[in-house]
Amino acid sequence: MTIQESRYITITDKIIKEKDVQKLAKAIDTLSKRRRKDGSYTSTYSVKCEEDASFSSNDVSIFANESPIQSKRIIEIRMNFSRHFSDERVSIILRHGNPYLKSDNSITVEGDDPNWVNGTLKKLEEIVDGFEPQNTFVKKYGKYIFALYSFVFSFVSVNIVLELIIKYEFHQLEFPTGSFLSFWLFPLMILGVIVFLLTIPVIKLWIYVEKLFPSVELQIGSEYKFIEKNKRFWINTSLAVIVVPIILQIIFEVVKSLL
C-alpha cells in the first residue's frame, strides 16, 4: 500500500527579490533535471502582472534579466514540478500583498517517499530563510502609535479651544435657565467632536501605512515599479526633514516653559 505524504511551509514577512526567485526556480529546475531521464517529469513557471498580463514557460529563463516580465509590476509567481504517473510534486506560490489565506504564499511538497519529501522541503526552506525580512514594526505596534497620535492631537486641539474660550470670554455667555450648556460642558463637547472627526482619518492613515509593509513584497523588475518601497522612502524622508524637527521644537518649547 502506497501512503502519500504532503508537507508545506508558509511564507510571511519577507521581501522577495529577483535573485531569490531565481534561486527557487533553479532549485525546481535542478530537481526536474535529475528526474527527467525517463521523460515523465515537467516543471512550469508562471507570472501574473498588475497590467492585466501573464507569462508562463517551462524554462527558468522567464526570470532572466532580459525577460519581458522585467518591465512589469509582478503580483504573483507560481512554480510547479510534477511527475506524470506519480503523486510526486512541488508547488510554490508567491503572492504580493497581505494574504487572507496561508496558502497564498507557500511551498508544498508531496510524494510517497518521506525522505524525498522532507529533503526537498528542507532545501527550499533554506532558500526562503535567506530572504530579506520585512519590517513588522507597523504591523505589531502601528495601532498603538496611531491611537497615541489621535489622543495627543485631540489633547492639543482641546487646549487650543480652551485658550480661545478664555481669551474671547465665551464662557461668560449667558444661557437660558435650566440649559445644560456650561463652561466645562462646552469644551467636552468640542473634545468629543474632535475625537470623532479624527477617528476615521487616523484609521485610514493606519491602513494606508500598513499596506506599505506587505506580508510578502515582490521586488522584481524595474525599481520604479516598487511602489511600496518608493513610498516608504518618501515617508522616511519627510519624517526626517519635517516631522522630527517639529516634534523636537515642541518638546523644547514645553521644557522651556516648565523651567
Image (spheres, helix red, strand yellow):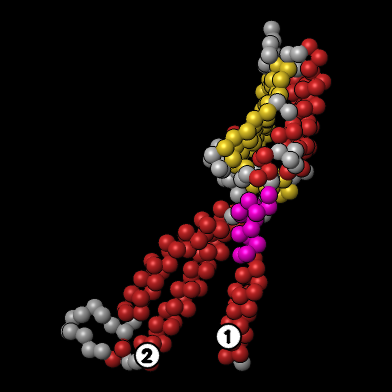
Along the viewing direction, whichever of 78 and 154 lies nearer the viewer = 78
| Residue lying at 82% horizontally and 20% vertically, measured from the top left | 34
- Residue occupied by mark 1: 254
Along the viewing direction, whichever of 187 and 204 lies nearer the viewer = 204
Percent across and percent down for residue 239 are 62, 70
| Residue lying at 26% horizontally and 89% vertically, measured from the top left | 173
Percent across and percent down for residue 164 are 38, 87
| Residue lying at 64% horizontally and 52% vertically, measured from the top left | 226
160 vs 199: above or below: below
Reply yes or no: does residue 232 show up in magenta: yes
- Per the model, the C-alpha gap separating discs 2 and 1 is 21 Å
Along the viewing direction, whichever of 14 and 76 lies nearer the viewer = 76
Q: Quadrant of the C terminus?
A: bottom right
Q: Which residues are magenta?
A: 222-235
Q: In the structure shown, which secondary structural element does the residue marked by tag 1 occupy? A: helix
Q: Quadrant of residue 127?
A: top right
Percent across and percent down for residue 107 are 68, 32
Could one spot residue 122 in this view of the protein? Answer: no
- Residue occupied by mark 2: 166
Question: The residue under label 1 is which amino acid type?
Answer: Val
116 vs 257: above or below: above
Most common secondary structure along the magenta stretch? helix
Along the viewing direction, whichever of 139 and 213 lies nearer the viewer = 213
Could one spot residue 164 in this view of the protein? Answer: yes
Task: Determine crowd level at label 1: few under 14, some 14-19, many 20+ residues with C-alpha closer than 10 A.
Answer: few
Q: Quadrant of residue 110?
A: top right
